[in-house]
Image (cartoon, helix red, strand yellow):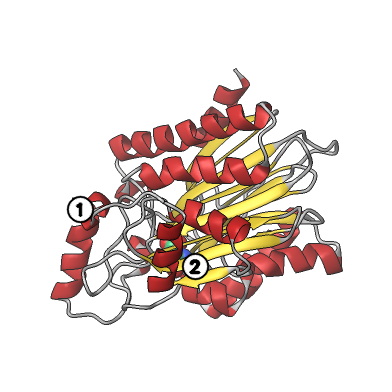
Amino acid sequence: MRLLSWSVILFLLGCGTSSDIENDTPREWAIAIHGGAGNFGKEHVDENAQAQYSASLNSALERGEQLLQSGSSATDVVVEVMKILENDSLFNAGRGAVYTSDGTHELDASIADGQTRNTGAVTGLQGFKHPIDVAKSVMDSSSHVFFSGHGAGEFAKSLGHEEADPSWFHTDKAYNRFKKAAARAGDVPQPVDEKKGTVGCVVLDMHGNLAAGTSTGGMTYKKHGRIGDSPVIGAGTWADNRTCAVSATGWGEYFIRTGVAQDIHSRMLYANSSLSEACRGAIFDEMGALGGDGGVVAVSSTGKISLVCNSAGMFRAWSSPDGRGVAMFTSDGKGTVEIH
Ligand code: ASP
């Protein structure tokens, strides 16, 4: 019943740009996920597509809930949930990733473990089904934290990660966007309203540990070798048990320039900001003030959940023992805050 009520309330409210679930007692577990942000409103995502997004987000969350309730670790939950999203061609990560200007797929992913403060990331990965899994291997099975391109592929191969042909990543939607961009002969990135579909997951597990992960194909028609925020620890991903776990999505260049994920952590650690204050400060006052757009999903060490964006849309969902919710659009335009 409770699960239903969150979704219904948010649907009726029109799903605002930020959602905070405040609670004085620490929660046993919490999880939040996103499926990308952009300047898309209800008019751009028809009811059928909304239902598809909602179903995909809910089934990923369900798996996360099961794992968390059975005591799985935060990092394992992040990987399992994100593999579901990477397999889902609705999103710009793994299968369904956008095309580069060379007509290929270059995948980025990162993961952060709040307990150990270890991290793993890959950028420009080609031909592997689950970049988030490779990022976890970088964290667990190497003495490094970040692999790129060919070296990332060699590393993934040496550990037996599942490979896939280019056709596995293809979707007509991503290819049509590539063709549209190519026709414009743009070496400029796609307009903001098309930058949606990156996936991310933040988790507090029953053992009190936080973890975060982010995975993406990047931006349509990005130049070969371009790196966005998603694999950059401190920009797109962060986890520290003292404060929070964060996964970002949006215009990556701006998230790198303002170090969004680490900014949120630092505000909490050094300025004693609450999770929601920290997220709003980083998104609205810093990243947004420079002209970027997008958002974050974040959980705190006490299980608070904050989902903040300054774009018209962000596919996002969350769950805790108090209930589950899904949101997609803003009710009152860019840069506004709605507390739930
Ligand atoms: N942040 C990603 C990037 O810039 C794209 C996105 O989140 O939509 O690569």
Q: Kindly tell me whether residue 38 is visible in this rendering.
A: no
Q: Tell me the residue that label 2 is attached to.
A: 293
For residue 235, which quarter of the picture? bottom right
Question: Which residue is drawn at the image coordinates 55% and 70% (left, top)?
Answer: 146
For residue 176, which quarter of the picture? bottom left
Q: Furthest residue to the left?
A: 183
Asked whether the beta carbons under mark 1 and mark 2 sit within 8 Å of each other, the answer is no
Is 201 positioned to the left or the right of 97 in the image?
A: right
Is 329 positioned to the left or the right of 176 in the image?
A: right
Give the spatial CA distance, label 1 vs label 2.
31 Å
- Secondary structure under tag 2 reads loop
The quadrant of the rendering that contains the N terminus is top right
Question: Which residue is drawn at the image coordinates 53% and 34% (left, top)?
Answer: 61
Question: Which residue is drawn at the image coordinates 55% and 48% (left, top)?
Answer: 16
- Secondary structure under tag 1 reads helix
**Residue 109 x, y percent position in the rendering:** 48, 60
**Amino acid bearing label 2:** Asp
Question: Nearer the viewer's eye, disc 1 or disc 2?
Answer: 1
**Residue 139 x, y percent position in the rendering:** 61, 59
**Residue 137 x, y percent position in the rendering:** 54, 56
Classed neighbour count for the residue bearing mark 2: other residues with Cα under 10 Å, few (<14), some (14–19), many (≥20): many
Question: Which is nearer the N-term, disc 1 or disc 2?
Answer: 1
Q: Is residue 143 above or below residue 319?
A: below
Is 57 positioned to the left or the right of 116 in the image?
A: left
**Amino acid bearing label 1:** Ser
Q: Tell me the residue that label 1 is attached to.
A: 167
Q: Nearer the viewer, residue 38 or 179?
A: 179
Q: Nearer the viewer, residue 256 or 116?
A: 116
The quadrant of the rendering that contains the C terminus is top right
**Residue 226 x, y percent position in the rendering:** 39, 77
